[in-house]
Image (spheres, rainbow, N blue to C red):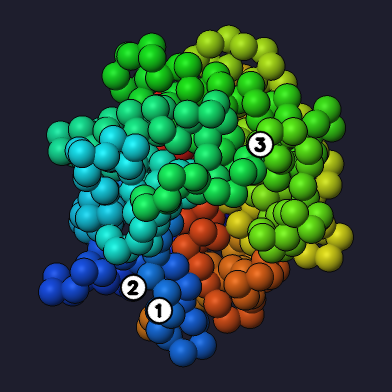
Amino acid sequence: MADIKTRAKEAAIAGLNFLVRTQNRDDMSADFGRFPFIFDCAAGVTTCGTTSWTTGTCVDALLAGYRFTGNADYLDAARRGVAYIKSLQYFCPLNPRVNGAMCENTPQSRGSHPRDGLTAAWGMLDWSQETGDTDAFERAKLFAAWFMTEAMAKGFPYWTAHWDREVWTPNTVGSFHSGSAFFFYRLHAVTGDDRYLAPMRTILDHYNTRHLDADGVITVILDRDTLEPLDNTERGAFAPRGWQIMHQYNDDFGALANLAGWKATGDASCRDGAVRFLKRMLATQRDDGGFGPAEWSVPSAAGPILTELHAAKALGIDLDAGAAVARAVDYLIGTQVRRENDRADGAFLGFSGPNTYDLSDHLANARTGAYAIAGLLRVAGAVDPYYFFEA
């Protein structure tokens, strides 16, 4: 059997080729540049195009793939993806409360989840640094200004923003915003502007003290005002239970953001937060190599955890994770469709339905796929600053 780096490289490249093959390239369509969010591998068709944030994650996976392989097809696909992201940015100078924000799914969306929009802006930022696209760079900074002023008007960021409503609901906060801090770390890294450190600190302080407990267990949903935990409660039922479980293992790059916070500021609480979560994942890794509850491995968890383990090691934190990394690679490769000359070749299977988050036997999705590619590229030896640190 080939060594782990070779296997990871082959799987990542197959995943990248799937993104290129299935991207919408119809320049007469408003969907130009979108990737499959959901792809039916049995029928060979896209059933749902990527949202703002899944387009952003695909762009970053492609940029990392381009750096690693030099394949210009990946850069071209990233360019098309960024073009779609640009079409989602909401410009309304007469209403600063929404000016610069991202529409959630299409330009017709009347709101967004700020965490999702941030991931799209993150893709634009990284694209700008790879290519010198000043328009994308200014757009990313405009989004950051909106996020810092409006999405964080009450401190920890809003769950959802609505263009046409005075009150933004729900009145809850989610652990998934932990990863938002990395976007501000990245802005600080490329601009040298210290004002981006304040939102990074605010987000990580809240996450590490309110969402992440001493054992590395994540509480996903809190009441904004009382900080009451709402996971698995009637008030938290607006978020499907499977989605809540997913975010206890797929931390939405919270550990990566904590590592970045420690790197930028030397704050030991950030290092400790990252280590707590990663040690719990290593201690509870399932027999199949994935990460999740007793019943199933969460498909979208292994990719981010691979990225985060490599980020920790890059900063001198050795968690003795070699065997766990090998099992996680095996898990991800086991979820990949490999059928030569098939449109689905290279796709990574994902969740089985809109309210369930276990592994489907025929549905691939961009959340799992882009995260898997990013994690596998780290194992293969990729060196780049995309969802990682400066080389």
- Give the structural element (helix, strand or loop) at label 1: strand
Q: Residues within 10 Å of mark 1 (few under 14, many from 20)?
A: many
Q: Which residue is mark 1?
A: 46
Quarter in which the C terminus is drawn: top left
State which tag comes first along the sequence, 3 or 1.
1
Give the quarter of the image for residue 189: top left
Q: Tell me what residue is drawn at x 63 percent, y 21 percent.
A: 205
For residue 211, what is the image quadrant?
top right
Q: Nearer the viewer, mark 3 or mark 1?
A: 3
As rendered, which of 148 and 34 lies closer to the eye? 148
Amino acid at circle 2: Thr
Instruction: Give the CA distance from mark 2 to mark 3.
Output: 40 Å
Residue drawn at x 66%, y 30% as measured from the top left: 207
CA gap, disc 3 and disc 1: 37 Å
**Residue 14 visible in image:** no
Mark 2 vs 1: CB contact within 8 A? yes
Instruction: Tell me the quadrant of the picture where the N terminus can be found.
Output: bottom right
Q: Nearer the viewer, residue 56 or 98?
A: 98
Q: Residue at x 53, y 35 (%)?
A: 157
